[in-house]
Image (cartoon, rainbow, N blue to C red):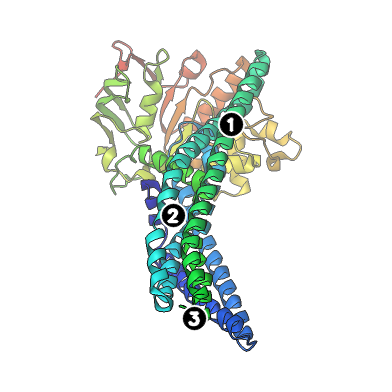
Amino acid sequence: MKGVERRLLGCLPRRVTVVLGVLAAGQGVLLVVQAELLVRAVAGLDAGPLPWLAGAVAGRAVLAWAVSLVAGRAAARVKRDLRGALLGAPAGDAGARVTLLTRGLDGVDPFFTGYVPQLLAACVIPVVVLVRLVAADWASAVVVAVTVPLVPVFGALVGMRTAALTGRQWGLLHRLGGHFRDVLAGLSTLRAFGRTGHQSVVVRELADGHRRASVRALRVAFLSSLVLELVCALSVALVAVPVGLRLLAGEMAFSAGLLVLVLTPEVYLPLRALGQRFHACAEGVAAAGEVFAALEEAPAAAPGGRVVVAGGAPEIVLRDVTVRYPGSRAPALEGVSLRVAPGERVAVAGPSGAGKSTLLLVLAGLVVPDSGRVLVDGVDLAELDVAAWRARLGWVPQRPHLFAASVADNIRLGDPGAGDERVVEAARAAAAAEFVEGLPEGFATVLGEGGAGLSAGQRQRLAIARAYLSGGPVMLLDEPTARLDLHSERVLVDAAGRLLEGRTAVLVAHRPALLGVADRVVRLDGGRVCGGVCGEAA
């Protein structure tokens, strides 16, 4: 069993495994009882055992239903936990992550509902049946005991090839889903530059590659079924031929011979079914491997303590802060020292790649410095309660994301418990109320994903309203006026002025209008604070 399968089994609560094992043992016992009753009815030409035989068959059906119920509920719980963990992990490729969260984790169902119950049945039922065969005819039991290991051996040989092909199939599907999602997200840009035809060819090639990989995996799966059927048929023949000869010679009772012939195939049946279940869940196991890899690669959460700084606009001090990203030669920030006084508004300017956005991420506690300290009212940010600190932050990114929900709900992300009056007040402060009230259903208008249907300036004003509603004493703005026309910029700068009033703020800005809102301007270049215009530094 591979590491991924062991980890998936570890996700099952122990009590579920125990229950499934007990149900498998019950099925094995009822199987032996059913065979005994059938032999008595046939060998003795007696209809008396038939009602009991029907009861045994019904009992096996009830146990099979119980197995599917327990396994199905366990699978739902495991998928829910894995999805929750995966949603909490940073996503590098959003499209690939969507594929993993939907089709990928849905493929785990056959593992828990089919493979795991069948694995337990394959461990328990052959033992129960073999014990009864020993009592009926020890010679036949020896032949069965010797040939039974051949089934998992041949199954494993074919299964290793299947696992490799299925892993390749899942990798192609992962890539196809991610690329297709990215193409849809950038479809308007592709149309503008006349590249839709090229991307259609790329998607077609990826889909064709996935189709060929799926056919290869199915071909090997059919080969596996053929191999297992052949091994099982030969094994049963090794028992059936001697039993038939002994019956003809009168060396064996008819009832004992019939019982051996009825029970022998049942020893191999769970192992044959296990091979089929393995192929059915192979894609889900490959997807689970991707999930575990994504969770292991997720960066550790920023360390945090339990200190909660008192309310009000705080003083923020950076002392020799250095940040290096993995794989990058030059540091994103190098020895940055800066003091932002309580209620002061500091603008950070500089060329692209100077480290401006990294500085905001450090202040938000989303990036941990390699060296140096960040102090909030004299307390190291590493010692603060991270959740409490972020609850005090208002964030206006360069590209705010709006969800496929109402305008009011998108603004209410700043404070999920806010009433309609506060939402409208925040929209007015952000100069967004006028265009929102002009929408077909006002604040109840449902937006498209990403704010489809709104201009860039309107989306930024909703982000300002969201930050205003949060009411945090610290505001971080990352070039909110980028790519806006002059009118939208003027409206947004006025709204930003109202937002930043009485708050400690750090804003990344290039354009003069937004720089005018700041009390002073600090310039970054190459990850360092430039001299001359930097203002006071700690």
Q: Residue placed at 63% from the left, 80% from the top?
A: 54
Residue 334 lies, in percent from the top left, at 27, 20
User: Going by the picture, which residue comes out furthest to the top?
Assistant: 532
Residue 119 lies, in percent from the top left, at 44, 59
| Above or below, 384 relative to 519 | below
Residue 243 lies, in percent from the top left, at 48, 70
Residue 294 occupies which quadrant of the picture? top left
Amino acid carrying label 3: it is Ala
Direction from residue 425 to residue 292 in the image, left or right: left
**Labels 1, 3: front one:** 3
Q: Residue placed at 58% from the left, 38% from the top?
A: 426
Amino acid carrying label 2: it is Val
Q: Residue placed at 39% from the left, 39% from the top?
A: 293
Circle 3 is placed at which residue position?
Answer: 253
Q: Residue placed at 56% from the left, 73% from the top?
A: 60
Circle 1 is placed at which residue position?
Answer: 212
| Secondary element at tag 2 | helix
Circle 2 is placed at which residue position?
Answer: 151
